[in-house]
Image (cartoon, coloured by chain):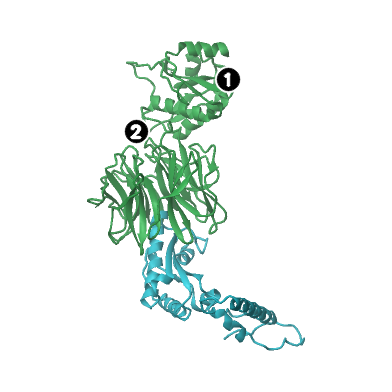
Amino acid sequence: MLPSLSSRSLARLALVGVATVSLAACAKKEPLPTKLPPQTQAPQQTPQTPMPQNTGPIGQQSTAPVPGSAQDFIVNVGDRVYFDTDSHDVRADAEPILSGQAGWLRRYPSVRVRIEGNADERGTREYNLALGARRANAVRDFLVAQGITSDRISTISFGKEQPLDAGTGEEAWQKNRNGHTAIVSGAR
Amino acid sequence: MTKTAIAIRSRLAALLLACMCVATAMVVANPARAEVQVNINRADLKPLPIAIPAFGGQQGAEIAQVVQANLQRSGLFLPLDPASFIEKDLNAAVQPRFADWKTINAQALVNGQVTIEGGRIRVDFRLWDVFQEQQLLGLQFTSSPENWRRVAHKISDAVYERLTGEKGYFDTRVVFVAESGARGAVTKRLAIMDQDGANPSYLTGGDSIVMTPRFSPTSQEITYMALKPDSATVYLFNLQSGRRESLGTFPGMAFAPRFSPDGGRVIFSVERAGNSDLFVMNLSSRSSSRLTSDPGIDTSGSFSPDGTKIAFNSDRSGSPHIYVMGADGSAPRRISNGGGRYTTPVWSPTGEYIAFTKQEGGQFHIGVMKPDGTDERLLTSSYLDEGPTWAPNGRVLMFSRETPGGAPKLWSVDVTGRILQPMPYPGAGSDPAWSPLLN
């Protein structure tokens, strides 16, 4: 269920629409060989509903992410999957998330991603870099097997250098053993 | 003071001033009787009581303090409290009153004199065997005044060598990764300091995650890895010129670099499609060749000091172990056989041992084993010990230690495991690398 749009969000959406339209107008003056970016659809989707009447306090919350945005990917698909200790096998609980990532990437074909492999602190620096690289590539291989072309995917390992959870103990370590799919370009 | 200096100088047989720091052996006693000495291999070693009173002249007190601290940290010497000294204001040109030093049970005595002359600092010092009442060593060092700490380190090395029979390790530097900021958002900068924690300075800014710096055999160059969100690059960094260059561009990540003993090559890992293998690059031709090609992780390559073999880390058998192979990649053989996970092998400068990190039962250890895998000994145990580096004489190891949730600190342990202590550097640091003895 999508949360209702607040007045501020609507105003922001409207502004985005104006900006996009004016950009599109500029682009027309100097014809570009490329097709118009998909952003031009945004104004058509901008709701033209009137501002709410002053009938009392207005609840405000974040709007649902713009479909095709990095936020949409993170919130509605999931940008991270987790691994067992010393393992780079894609776990059963990671498969639906990665399938979702593949589906999302098929829907938004201009998006490029970087898979970042991460390890917990219970290993030495160099080995963990190599282990993180294995995890990143396990994620990459899964996406490629689901039809995402490999030229849209780069990989890197951060080893144990960028822990998601700075704590210690198994709960933190489990969070830190992950593959993170970061959107590099092409999202809204 | 001048008279003293002249007297000492007149007594020195030869005087070489060509180098920045010049050592001239004057009198080396060759006694038939047992002289004072430190047997560093004895398990029940008691540190040798040694008196190091303030040297005469400008900065004489500071120099004596640096020598004291060095010898104390080695764990082999027990510098005595200057408050207990009976003979005060020693004249380095005159024989000490041995009876006064015997009374406080000083086995050895180091005294000296500093002279500033023509913009140069000259330090004369003598090492005495108190109970044999004889001079063991008389040396003079000359340098520019700002080098006074290095002169103190060279004196420490001379005393250490004369009394232990092995080379010292005090006139050396340490390159490491200085860490700042909260856990999870740490800024990492390459830094360098003297082995006693003095003169720390940064070599890089904090714009990338730097790790695993290692000295070239000349101590003039460092190789390290810098990690950015989209790249992992091995660099060569010249300490004199400040010039930095990439080792090259590879299909995947390049990491874990280390110089060959002749300084002409760098061994490193390259990751491709998730698999890490060892490569070696000839630095003059810039051609690299592949050393391993199995599907396991192969990393942390370290040459034997004669350059004929390579120790490395591989999990080709299922979990990480230490392997040794020929320098051309031939005949790899697993040498670690215990339980647990073995990583970060580093061949000792003497060739006698391979140091490593071992992870077992929730603890991390720094350990050593012979290159054939025998005689494994664990020297430390903690929540997280990692990444040993050898002092150039193969007697002491430095590594980083983390407490749960804490920042890493630099620690050292001697090869017997008895002398474990934090390094005298107050900040957070990891990935230390010890330089060879400086020239």
Q: Is residue A180 visible?
A: no
The cyan-tinted chain is: A
The green-tinted chain is: B
Mark 2 surroundings: few (<14), some (14-19) or many (≥20) residues within 10 A: few
Secondary structure under badge 2? loop
Which residue lies most toward the left here?
A: B331
For mark 1, what is the residue? B57
Number of the label disc, if any, that sits on residue B169: none
Quarter location, residue B391:
top left
Number of numbered labels in the structure image: 2
Disc 1 to disc 2, C-alpha distance: 37 Å
Q: Position of residue B307 (x, y in %)?
A: 29, 41
Residue at the image point whose x is 75% and y is 88% from the top: A53
Amino acid marked by disc 1: Gly
Q: Position of residue B350 (x, y in %)?
A: 32, 37
Question: Seen in the image, is B374 located left or right of residue B387?
Answer: left
Mark 1 surroundings: few (<14), some (14-19) or many (≥20) residues within 10 A: some
Amino acid marked by disc 2: Asn
Q: Nearer the viewer, residue B194 or B68?
A: B194
Q: Position of residue B203 (x, y in %)?
A: 52, 45
Mark 1 and mark 2 on one chain: yes
Question: Seen in the image, is B391 located left or right of residue A184?
Answer: left
Q: Which chain is disc 1 placed on?
A: B
For mark 2, what is the residue? B41
Q: Nearer the viewer, residue B422 or B140?
A: B140
